[in-house]
Image (cartoon, coloured by chain):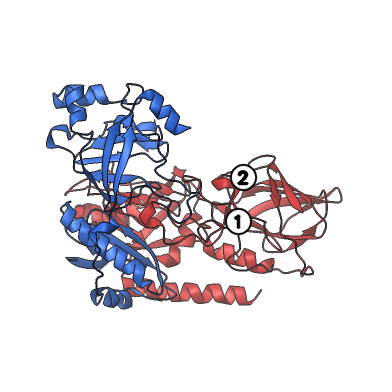
Chain colours: A blue, B red
Amino acid sequence: MIKNISNLGDAAIYCDFGSEVNREINHEVIKYFKTLTSKNIKGVTNLAPSYNKLIITFDLDVINYKELVEKIINLKLDEISETASKRKKIPICIDEEFALDIERVSKNTNLTIKEVYKHILNKDFYCYMTGFVAGMPFLGDTNKNIRLKRLETPRVKVPKGSVGITEQFCNIYSYESPGGWNIIGNTPVKVFDKNKEENPILIKPGDSVQFYEITKNEFYKIKE
Amino acid sequence: MSIEVIRPGINTTFQDRGRSNLYHLGIPFSGAMDTRNLLITNKLVGNDKNDAVIEFALQGPKFKVKQNNINCVVTGNVSFTFKKNSKIYNGECYKTFDLNNNDEIDIISTNNSMYGYFSISGGFKIEKKWNSYSTHLRSKVGPNKGNKIVENDILQLNKNVKPIIKKSIDYLNSKIEFIRVIKGTNFDYFSKESQKSFFESQYQVTNLTDRMGMRLDGNKLNNIKSENIKSEGLIKGVIQVPPDGKPIIMLSDHGTIGGYPKIGVIVSADYDKIVQLPPMSKIKFKMIDVKSAEKLFKLYSMETKNILDQI
């Protein structure tokens, strides 16, 4: 349930579901997000669901904070069926060409490279949210033994498709962009495809994701 | 029917009123930074309020037109010239003028402001992406394959069947002494002294300002709770404070998720004004509540309507 509703500026509502990050809380956020999307409330211009918050922006010419809070409090939630969430299998290549930080990860976790990947490959991850840049999925939770901080100095350019880990999370860089996550591989699949008008993102909040290893040859074949 | 790009200028893109309902995918609103100038531009050339205009920052583009009887306008606080039948004229903002085949327009620079706008009666022949003509460079979404306008681009125009009607208006985006701010959701993360100093001291706009955000320099804000929050959604106008204590204002092309504490949010009525502040500008923030911000927005909306009604 929403623990607290407040305003974020004069044209957005900030719904706080708690401070912890776990699937139960995130499931509630997604439930509100999906219900509000289907209700299509006049004046609502954007919904930003995250781990444990939901931000709702609105057009001040159409509705105001007080009126919209009223509607959210009285919202009848749609139940989301578990089948709406999908299982996605994502190929990654962990060749040293792509695994930019694997040696450091191995050193700092006191695990062999093989052991690090044991915690990543063929494990079930859950997608909490998508964003920052278009299509970037925030996945969790990684095994306690491989949780590291971000890089001290972020990279100016993280290659597109890079798979990174930090704290209890794992993500995929859908674009080349600056970033400080520990890069352990690269996926050749398109995580964001603007040409798919209705469905541009591969991994949606609530989906489960498994990484499987591919060779460099297979990587370039899929890339084509 | 086209115009040729001789010089692209800085960050020249197609923009309209923005793209909604895609935050959850990681795509922000985008749209013209200065909405009021977008609306005035469209009205002056007789286009629809949802049509696209060309936005530029600091230095504008230079175009050669490849069509007779083109009615165009430049808005903002901008210096420009146009070459008509080989003669050069000084341009006047907010006043439409017509050009013929092989005439040129040279938008030299914005004056003491960031963004200027250019459009043509009938508009540009471009396609909507997710219900908007706005360009978001980072995700390469929008007209021109989501890219900036570059040298030698040829911009196609819609056929304009309407006769040319000359229009003009006196308008100058007023300077503002204070930027009004509503307390952010992490206001209490900052020490009492920093909360006070945020509203009492002066901040300076740095060179690190673009369509994504505006970095400020000034008194360091002391975070006494936690320098990182769990990543969550962002909206335009949010003022985030990273560990270095220097505020960053999120603007129209901001990343949709961020993990720095939010000390405040710029009120909607002042957004058009803050985006126009060039590097080195000095600003002061003033705290107000939601009710007052809503009143200010009503005034802003009425003022916009009055300006548009005069055209």
Q: Nearer the viewer, mark 1 or mark 2?
A: 1
Secondary structure of the residue carrying tag 1 is loop
Residue A154's place in the image compared with B127, above or below, is above
Which x, y percent locates residue A60?
41, 72
Question: For the residues tagged 1 and 2, is the chain the same?
Answer: yes
| Amino acid type of the residue that numbered disc 1 sits on in the rendered structure | Glu
Neighbor class of circle 1 (other Cα within 10 Å; few <14, some 14-19, many 20+) is: some
Which x, y percent locates residue A118?
18, 30
Is residue A6 left or right of B56 when viewed as pictured?
Answer: left
> Residue at position x 16%, y 52% from top?
A22
Of pointers 1 and 2, the one earlier in the residue sequence = 1
Give the image quarter of residue A71.
bottom left
Which x, y percent locates residue B131?
52, 61
Which residue is tagged 1? B127
Q: What is the number of the mark on residue A139? A: none
Secondary structure of the residue carrying tag 2 is loop
| Amino acid type of the residue that numbered disc 2 sits on in the rendered structure | Ile
> Residue at position x 44%, y 74% from top?
A61
Which residue is tagged 2? B149
Neighbor class of circle 2 (other Cα within 10 Å; few <14, some 14-19, many 20+) is: many
Camera sees residue A180:
no
Q: Are marks 1 and 2 in contact (CB under 8 Å)?
A: no
Which x, y percent locates residue A13?
30, 66
